[in-house]
Image: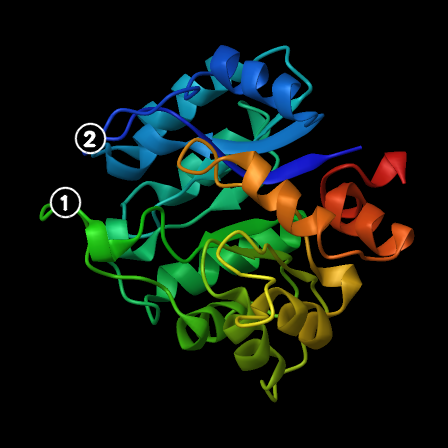
């Protein structure tokens, strides 16, 4: 089984995207042998009210068990608590995603800490992307900020009981920063490897596995911004033990999103 833990549905204002609808996503997944994908709304990232994007996503994935929806929540928005409850209880979202850079709030915002703690109490994971696109080639109206290792460490320390999916950044660096924390973290922290290399001249993928361990790494392709095949090639040439590969391809994410199937 193969689960893509980092995927998006929706539009991007700075360039056209392909396979960015539920139907298109499923078509590409079929071509690449991907059984399930964890998706959130790109529209929610830049809509003034994130709930418009969350509702659109819920409508697109309704009845499709292969697409696991996450709610984009903006804790700087006055009604974020109502959004949180509605997305989980009414729309059936299976987790959250946050975008501090795009939603323009600092990491010491008290509401962010409260949101993360609420996610931990509800036993739903929080996905935290370092970026959506490479800021070196960004449009001038796009955000100039990435979340690096220090920022990821700050975020996970806000709520030690919450499960986090750290993705779309140099997760080898993030893992080292997070694991140096003096604050115990009972919640799980998983890392994707979409921005890492596995070649001898830049062995960051191997470094992530050494730092985090096979139980904390997952497959994330960042569709539709990137091609899933690139991550599949990395795994193919890494020659990992079969059990390690199974955990990365699906097992670790199944423990988060499908514990009843483990």
Q: Secondary structure at mark 2?
A: loop
Q: Residue at x 24, y 32 (%)?
A: 47
- Relative horizontal placement of residue 239, taking residue 165 as reference (left or right): right
Kindly report the distance in space between the C-alpha atoms of the residues bearing marks 2 and 1: 10 Å
Residue 98 is situated, as x and y percent measured from the top left of the image, at 41, 50
**Rendering quarter of residue 80:** top left
Does 76 appear above or below 80?
A: below
**Rendering quarter of residue 43:** top left
Q: Residue furthest left?
A: 140
Q: Quadrant of the C terminus?
A: top right
Task: Identify which residue, 182 or 132, lies in the foreground.
Answer: 132
**Label 1: which residue?**
139
Do tag 2 and tag 1 residues touch (Cβ < 8 Å)? yes
Q: Quadrant of the N terminus?
A: top right
Residue 198 is situated, as x and y percent measured from the top left of the image, at 61, 62
Q: Secondary structure at mark 1?
A: loop
Q: Which mark is residue 13?
A: 2
Residue 220 in sight here = no
State how the image is colored.
rainbow
- Mark 1 surroundings within 10 Å by alpha-carbon count, few (fewer than 14), some (14 through 19), many (20 or more): few
Q: Residue furthest front?
A: 200
Task: Identify which residue, 31 or 251, lies in the foreground.
Answer: 31
Residue 252 is situated, as x and y percent measured from the top left of the image, at 77, 50
């Amino acid at each position: 089984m193969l689960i893509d833990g980092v995927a998006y549905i929706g539009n991007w204002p700075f360039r056209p995207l392909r396979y960015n609808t539920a139907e298109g996503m499923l078509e590409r997944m079929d071509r690449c042998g991907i059984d399930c994908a964890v998706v959130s709304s790109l529209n929610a990232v830049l809509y003034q009210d994130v709930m418009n994007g969350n509702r659109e996503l819920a409508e697109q994935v309704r009845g499709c068990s292969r697409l696991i929806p996450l709610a984009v929540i903006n804790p700087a928005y006055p009604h974020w608590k109502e959004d949180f409850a509605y997305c989980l209880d009414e729309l059936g979202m299976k987790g959250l995603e946050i975008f501090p850079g795009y939603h323009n709030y600092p990491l010491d915002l008290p509401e962010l800490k409260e949101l993360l703690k609420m996610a931990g109490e509800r036993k739903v994971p929080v996905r935290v992307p370092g970026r959506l696109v490479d800021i070196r080639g960004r449009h001038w109206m796009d955000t100039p900020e990435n979340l690096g290792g220090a920022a990821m460490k700050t975020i996970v320390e806000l709520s030690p009981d919450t499960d986090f999916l750290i993705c779309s950044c140099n997760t080898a660096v993030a893992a080292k920063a997070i694991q140096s924390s003096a604050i115990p973290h009972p919640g799980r922290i998983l890392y994707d490897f979409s921005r890492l290399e596995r070649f001898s001249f830049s062995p960051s993928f191997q470094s992530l596995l050494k730092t985090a361990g096979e139980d904390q790494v997952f497959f994330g392709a960042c569709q539709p911004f990137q091609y899933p095949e690139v991550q599949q090639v990395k795994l193919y040439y890494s020659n990992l033990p079969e059990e390690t590969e199974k955990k990365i391809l699906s097992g670790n994410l199944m423990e988060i999103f499908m514990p009843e199937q483990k």
